[in-house]
Image: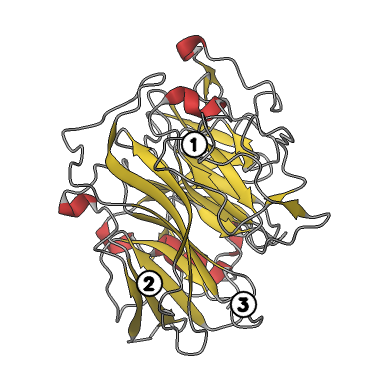
Amino acid sequence: MDGYGIHANRNFYDPYEVAFPNLTFDSPITFSPVPNQAKIVVGQLDGKVFSIGAANNTTVKQQIIDLSAEVGDRNEGQVWDGGFLGLAIHPEFGTTPGKNYFFIYYTTASDNPTLGGPQGFSCNVETFSGNYLILERFEVDPITMNFVANSRVTMINRRMYNTTHRGGGMEFGDDGFLYLSTGDQAAYVNAQELDENLDGGVLRLDVDMIGGGTSHAPIRTLSDPGAGDADEFSGIEYFIPNDNPFPSPGGATFEEYYSIGHRNPHRMTKDRGTGIFYIGEVGENTHEEINVVGAGNNYGWPKYEANALRDYCGTPLNPLSNVHTPPLTQFVRSEASSIIGGYVYRGSNMPELVGKYIAADYAQNTIWQIDTGTGEKQLLGDFGPHKLFLLVRMYKESSIF
């Protein structure tokens, strides 16, 4: 096992090796290999983004950009649930002129944040406290890894409602399109409505704006009457792939959606072996779930929590979607209570885990392996402060640098 042992009860891999032992970060939340380079980009929850070398003994981290003055940070009392949530690097970064872009997703700070505890968790109540959800693009020099001044462009600006459920998983698919998971913002019916928001789904965007037979300019945007509030906008510097599964030539609904019915798809990651996206979906009262992303799928929230029928709000499943798509696997609350996501392992040091989705539960401090074919799950064990880098190491081994 290349230095890794397995306990007699096969409960966990031990000993553990800390990834990048010479570096420290403050609440790192994104971990992105740089295409075609032996570098990694790490994004912190506070909005600071760093570049490091891929070698495990690296001692240098270079700050690319500091957005901490704009990103709402719970640790600073600016949001209840939010911060810097997603980062994706254009797959042609450093190889094609005009493609040296980083894409980021974050919540802004507010002068009047709602910090008294969770708000929302109802059918359609939306409390606005002055914060926004931002999808942004900026340019980075691929040689120096320095931020290119005056290159920031806001692509989507949405109001941030209630206190939680932002999503934020973001990565490019093998098709070259950008995928972004968004939460229901604790207003449940948002996950089944395609005409008033961009919440509760996975969005699929053509950021290269290819056009022709591939994609087209957005027809409905948040700036349209009845589609959003006056301070919201969308449709900047991206097109809609023509084969997105919710077409609306007349502009009645948003065409960005690739899948719907998501509650809180906190982390979405791609299996580099298959190109398939997996989501760790945080449930409410009864179940957690792992979902496999598919075109036109409806994962059922709020009518379903995993496979459990709720009928909350009397909300029917959106008739534009496929029938209810069950999760790859589900967890009852005695097993997990905040599945935030993980990675499909494609490394070589732990052959028994190759092709398995390795997921962590934030609340119960456990790590699970899930068979991506059958959905069968097995507890690998718990993790404490000395084991937090295990998933990072797995991802590092599963990535191509």
- Which label sits on residue 31? none
Write down the residue under mark 1.
199
Q: Which residue lies under the disc numbered 3?
A: 98
Q: What's the distance in space between the residues labelled 3 and 1, CA to CA?
A: 30 Å
- On the question of residue 53 being in view, the answer is yes
What kind of element bears circle 1? loop
Question: Residue 145 sits in which quadrant?
Answer: bottom left
Residues at circles 3 and 1 in contact by the CB criterion of under 8 Å: no
Comparing labels 3 and 1, the label whose residue is closer to the camera? 3
User: Can residue 396 be seen by looking at this rendering?
Assistant: no
Query: Which badge, 2 or 3, comes first in the chain's sequence?
Result: 2
| Residue 314 versus residue 334 in the image, above or below | above
Amino acid marked by disc 2: Glu
Residue at 18 percent across and 47 percent down: it is: 111
Q: Is residue 195 left or right of residue 156?
A: right
Q: Position of residue 61 (x, y in %)?
A: 34, 82
Crowding at mark 1 (Cα within 10 Å: few <14, some 14-19, many 20+): many
Please provide percent x and percent y for residue 239: 66, 53
Residue drawn 28% across the image and 70% down it: 25
Q: Quadrant of residue 236?
A: bottom right
- Above or below, comparing residue 242 to residue 315 in the picture: below
Check disc 2 and report the residue beneath it. 17
Q: Residue, x 36% and y 20% (percent of image)? A: 122
Q: Hey, which residue is sitting farthest right in the picture?
A: 213
> Quick one: label 2, few (<14), some, or many (20+) residues within 10 Å?
some
Asked whether 367 or 29 is in front, the reply is: 29
Q: Secondary structure at mark 3?
A: loop
- List x then y, in percent, for residue 282: 43, 36
Q: Nearer the viewer, mark 2 or mark 3?
A: 3
- Looking at the picture, which amino acid does disc 1 mark? Asp
Q: What's the distance in space between the residues labelled 2 and 1, CA to CA?
A: 38 Å
